[in-house]
Image (cartoon, rainbow, N blue to C red):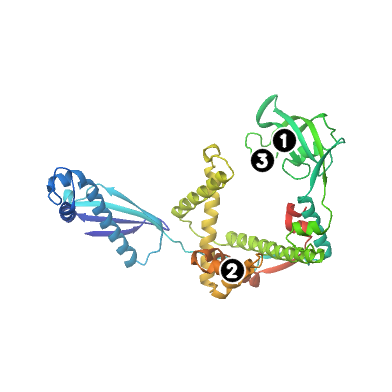
Amino acid sequence: MQANLEAIGNIERRLTISLPAEDIDSEISTRLRKLAQTMKMHGFRPGKVPLKVVAQQYGSQVRQEVLADKLQKIFGEAVRDNNLRVAGYPKFEARPAGAEGVNHLEYSATFEIYPEVKLGDLAGVTIERPALAVADAEVDRTIEVLRKQRATYHTIERAAQKDDLVTIDFHGEIDGQAFQGGDGKGVRIVLGSGRMLPEFENAVLGVLPNETRSFDLSYPADYHGKDVAGKTARFSVTVNTVDEPRLPPLDAEFAKSLGITDGDLDKMRSEVRTNVEREVEARIRSRLKDQVFQALLDRSSLDVPQSLVELEMRNLAQAAQRDLEARGVKAKDMPLPADILRSQAERRVRLGLILGEVVRAHSLQVKPEQVRAAVEHHAKSFEQPQEVVKWYYSSPERLQEFESAAIERNVVDWAVSVARIETKVTALEELMGKANA
């Protein structure tokens, strides 16, 4: 039994294994005899099935099991002896018989190892930190957003305005030809919500009920629909109805709808302020994290194991399929572009390896008290925080999300301590995006 390890690339390795055929045949015979002792087959007493019959029925299966066991054992020993960190799974393949001929079986195990990660210096990186103190104006603005979310709509006879709910029929053509997604009947949209392209929604502004308007619309070059990206379509839109939004009054009933059981408006404002502050903190952390991670990606170098990329692609595809199915869309009707999946997977693998090296190099391992603080912070948004904390700690698997978040926080805090930080006063709507626009 021989094994020879060779490097075939920076992180690719190949282990060539030679197995004496006599040893394999002997092990197969041993296992078949043991199987025959307990095997039950119609026409024979238990344990009395002829070895030849057992071999005919199970010989191929047993042979595969023996070979798999031998190869895995030798592979494991070679990995331990050479202190290798294997990335992904090895690929075993049979090889043509060598000089020993039929006396030996030749196999190869091709695999990748974890790469050396060369971290870039973040001392010269500038990171922008948003700054926002939540004042009464931000609380008022958030309450208005909450009122809009609870608006009721009433049909009126006037031209469509921003925030109105309109029901429309539309037909679009490119170069005189209809195209997929260019037709709609009874489509309901709130103007200004961003459900359609801004140019489309703006074209509907000022249109009266039962009025038709035609206009040209140019699709952006990076539009998600590749068939229309960068092209100009001619649309005809008929407004069927215009519904005006009516916001709920700022009273005890409104406060109760937000979970304030006694309807106290001061309690409601205090609760809204706390939630806004919590969200502002989260958004600022997210902005910092995005910049830190991108800086690490830009300035670090490594060879990415493609075996890990393939595994991550499968994980992303499965997650996307579950999401589609949860929305009632059949996965086969929405094929996932392999190039996008590969790009996302490679970025995630690359970033994961870099973060792991940052944690190791700068001793940023997570402490139990960090995880506990994160769980308790998360639990504050529930009615019974302590019960939530107990639930998470009742199963270690439930803490993985908080452990990962704590690692990311440690990395971001470290990066912020070494990079140049520029503070930028930021408006609430800019920090929150469309959710508060």
Q: Secondary structure at mark 2?
A: helix
- Kindly report the distance in space between the C-alpha atoms of the residues bearing marks 2 and 1: 44 Å
Q: Quadrant of residue 119?
A: bottom right
Quadrant, the N terminus: bottom left
Residue drawn where x is 63% and y is 66% of the image: 378
The answer to which of 352 and 281 lies nearer the viewer is 281
Q: Quadrant of residue 209?
A: top right
What residue is disc 2 on? 387
Q: Quadrant of residue 195?
A: top right
Residue drawn where x is 81% and y is 66% of the image: 266
The answer to which of 117 and 429 lies nearer the viewer is 429
Q: Position of residue 303 (x, y in %)?
A: 48, 57
Residue type at mark 3 is Tyr
Q: Nearer the viewer, mark 2 or mark 1?
A: 2
- Kindly report the distance in space between the C-alpha atoms of the residues bearing marks 3 and 2: 46 Å
What residue is disc 1 on? 187
Residue type at mark 2 is Glu
Q: Nearer the viewer, mark 1 or mark 3?
A: 1
Q: Secondary structure at mark 3?
A: loop
Visible in this render: residue 121? Answer: no
Q: Position of residue 319 (x, y in %)?
A: 53, 50
- Kindly report the distance in space between the C-alpha atoms of the residues bearing marks 1 and 3: 21 Å
Lower sequence index among marks 2 and 1: 1
Lower sequence index among marks 3 and 2: 3
387 displayed left or right of 84 = right
Residue drawn where x is 74% and y is 58% of the image: 258
Q: Position of residue 407 (x, y in %)?
A: 56, 68
Residue type at mark 1 is Val
